[in-house]
Image (tube, helix red, strand yellow):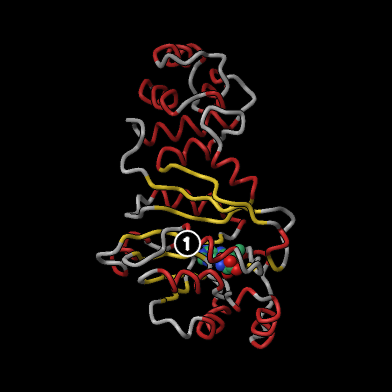
Amino acid sequence: MNRLSDIGTIKEILGRHGFTFSKSLGQNFLINPSVCPRMAELSGAKNGVGVVEIGPGIGVLTNELCKLADKVVAVELDKRLLPVLDETLAEYDNIKVINADVMELDLNALIADEFEGMDVVVCANLPYYITSPIIMKLLEDKLPIKAITVMVQKEAAQRICAEVGSRMSGAVTVSVNYYAKPSMLFSVSAGSFMPAPKVDSAVIRLDILSKPPVQTNEKKFFAVIKAAFSQRRKVISNSLSSGLSLSKEKTLEILKSANVPSNARAEKLSLDDFANIANNL
Ligand code: SAM
């Protein structure tokens, strides 16, 4: 068992370092000992693999990743955690902690510099205030990685893992499915964290596709998705014409060429439908 997920140990370490939780940095640390070993294992961390972790906190997941992977690079924004991590990760020589905002980092350069010759995966318990921006950055940067395994709020997990074309489908569902195959791994109760958040969480894995499932102009494709879901209750002809500033007549023409019914709603459309619309813009 990882002693770091013991609540007494965490309180003792944090107390000694005079650490107080920052709500604005999404600091909810894992205190359930069964979660990190499972998450690390399912992330694909193993011999020959390098791992990028985002937000190591006090290093509870990092510990498990260091046991399995060849090398772990953990990006932590809060510099108050650096001396804590020095202590909790002291037994490993395959860890590098970088003090930075992950949204500002050139992750392609980081991977090229740190993981030569290794397969690379991302594994993280994400700060909830920027879950989607981080996931979209990891995907849009087209990193040379195999998979992204992340803990997110359960509702966000359900949205990301929904079937494209189903009622739960949203802009993030379609966007993620352009880059990866998402799957729900397991749920984690709110009581597994300190401090406990208001909602439950879930661990999901995004297996990166070797090529996109549809051929399209990416800029137009993502503009169509954004416009279509910005007013998801409206029929597609209305949301597209207002979101893309197109005349009603032009929008109907595009939808006809794309073979998409003008009275369909965004959540019912497939990846092919979005690509066909973009390709007819
Ligand atoms: N991995 C730890 C765990 O599971 O107990 C902590 C997870 S906590 C939900 C999120 C962590 O992300 C915190 O340590 C927080 O300081 C860090 N963080 C927040 N925003 C960040 C950012 N923009 N870049 C890097 N780390 C960030």
For label 1, the residue is 41
Vertical placement of residue 17 versus 195, above or below = below
Quarter-wise, where is residue 238 in the image?
A: top right
Q: Image check: 72 left or right of 10?
A: left
**Residue 90, percent from left and from top:** 48, 85
Vertical placement of residue 173 versus 135, above or below = above
Quarter-wise, where is residue 155 in the image?
A: top right
Please give the name of the residue rendered at 32% of the width and 70% of the height, measured from the top-left corner.
Answer: 114
Farthest residue to the bottom: give it. Answer: 16
**Residue 77, percent from left and from top:** 53, 70
**Nearest the eye: 208 or 111:** 208
Give the secondary structure at mark 1.
helix
Q: Image check: 112 left or right of 29?
A: left
**Residue 59, percent from left and from top:** 54, 74
**Residue 209, percent from left and from top:** 36, 43
Q: Image check: 255 left or right of 209?
A: right
Ligand 1 is located in which of the four quadrants? bottom right
The number of numbered badges drawn on the structure is 1
**Nearest the eye: 54 or 163:** 163
Please give the name of the residue rendered at 49% of the width and 32% of the height, measured from the top-left corner.
Answer: 225
Q: Image check: 86 left or right of 26?
A: left
Disc 1 CB within 8 Å of nearest ligand 1 atom: no
